[in-house]
Amino acid sequence: MNYKDLPQVDKILNLSRFKNAIKAILSKFAREILSEQRELLKAEKTCLNADEIIEKIAHKYEKFQKQELSKVINATGVVMHTNLARSVIDEEILARAKDSICAYSTLEYDLNSGKRSNRYDYVGTLLASLFECEDAIVVNNNASAVFLVLNTFAKGGETIVSRGELVEIGGSFRVPSVMQSSGTKLCEVGTTNKTHFYDYENAINDDTKMLLKVHRSNFALVGFSQSVDIQAISDLAKKRNLIAYYDLGSGYVGELGYNLGKDEPNIAKIMQSGVNLLSFSGDKLFGSVQAGIILGKKELIAKIRSNQLLRMLRVDKITLALLCETAKAYLNKEFSLITTPNLINKSLAELEKMANLINSKLNRPLRVIKTSSFVGGGSLPNKSYPSLALKVDGNAIKNEEIFRANRIIGRIENDAFLLDLRSILQGDIAELIQKINQIQE
Ligand SMILES: *Cc1c(COP(=O)(O)O)cnc(C)c1O
């Protein structure tokens, strides 16, 4: 191998195998790999031949391309899979939002007066109506909602939280750290397993600004345990002239014809406790885009609106357009447009129908087995849902890899690779059938 035998970048870029590649990226990778080879030649070490060099570039490019945000089929059974983008936006919701995204819009313009308006007014009215509260505002995600609420109302003072609720969610959200960075002092009360009403009562002092309740979201406290419900916390806050705030995390809309968290009240019910502020994620059980939705009394939401930090955490027109369409679908009772709760509530009979349909079109039908799946996304911990799965015969680890290479993400259970039907979208069935047939050829 000689310097002059190294393949030229231009020639590499023109190879037919790279015809769909982003040339700027491919060229960068080619230069990097060629320069490594030149260094090897210079040091009189063995270097790769031309074919091997091209293979290496192709491999690097493929690895890069797989990092692209792109569609997969979720056959994990986990409906709100944090790594697979949590909630799915229905195509009809997207279609309805499209006009205001692909054109100039009234984001901050009032058609009534021809003057400037506020981007939060319309969505605020929709959400306030849906959740039967005075007002609402939307920020980037629920983590920012928590940060903003604490910063607006408890900065420089103390916030009381139960030790049983100092949770970590998804690695980067830890209640104590968020509290610290918001500027409030954490006042922990109770013990890991038990917090009593008197713990809150006794901890209140002149510096106390807020009583915070955090939904445990991704774990459950069972056995010898006790916590104080939002009603009691809200009553205490009212009596002592403090703010009660509930970081609900997920939460669901009571409007739906079914009851998702049988042990948990819906959001409108929780608001009836008199809690001053409540926040939750737009893309968990609510089933819309990433956002943090804050509900509360009008004067408190007004204070949040005037916090300078809101500008840093604000949502753009794409988020607002999609969120408004979801809220409108709830208000108009078009529940079929809200994917997440629909998947969670699919009956076993519906899943069985789906399994039979898939099997009727597979060249080699798969065994249908009973299993159970979790909702995921930090919601309804410990609550597993009965589900059905297609079991793929053979080595589970190999199968997982093969299906993953085909963008089908399943799960391994008891040494078998499963395609859990609970999280598979109706619109993905045809593609799934075609791919399974191809894999099993
Ligand atoms: C999920 C969750 C958060 C974080 O919400 P994001 O929308 O992911 O930022 C905060 N608090 C609780 C209790 C949660 O469940």
Image: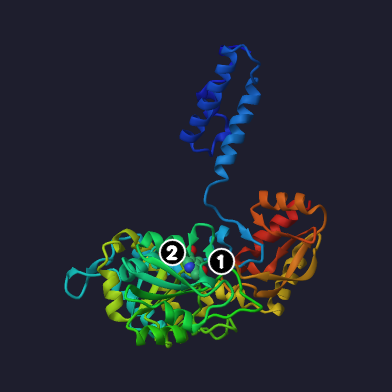
Q: Are marks 2 and 1 in contact (CB under 8 Å)?
A: no
In screen coordinates, is 113 left or right of 423? Answer: left
| Disc 1: residue Cβ within 8 A of ligand 1's nearest atom | yes
Q: Amino acid at mark 2?
A: Ala
Rounded to the nearest angstrom, the CA distance separating label 2 from label 1 is: 14 Å
Identify the coloring: rainbow
* Secondary structure beneath label 1: loop
Between 423 and 171, the one nearer to me in the picture: 171
* Secondary structure beneath label 2: helix
Residue 318 picture location, percent across and down: 38, 62
Q: Residue at x 52, y 31 (%)?
A: 29
Foreground tag (2 vs 1): 2
Q: Residue at x 59, y 74 (%)?
A: 193
Residue 283 shows in this picture: no
Q: Amino acid at mark 1?
A: Gly
Residue 429 picture location, percent across and down: 66, 64
Between 305 and 180, the one nearer to me in the picture: 180
Between 141 and 430, the one nearer to me in the picture: 141
Tell me, for residue 377, which label it has, or none: 1
| Disc 2: residue Cβ within 8 A of ligand 1's nearest atom | yes
Q: Quadrant of residue 384?
A: bottom right
The answer to whether residue 27 is above or below residue 174 is above
Residue 127 picture location, percent across and down: 38, 78
Tell me, for residue 364, which label it has, or none: none
Residue picked out by circle 2: 143
Q: Quadrant of residue 302?
A: bottom left
Residue 233 shows in this picture: yes
In screen coordinates, is 109 left or right of 11? Answer: left
Position of the N terminus, as image quadrant, is: top right
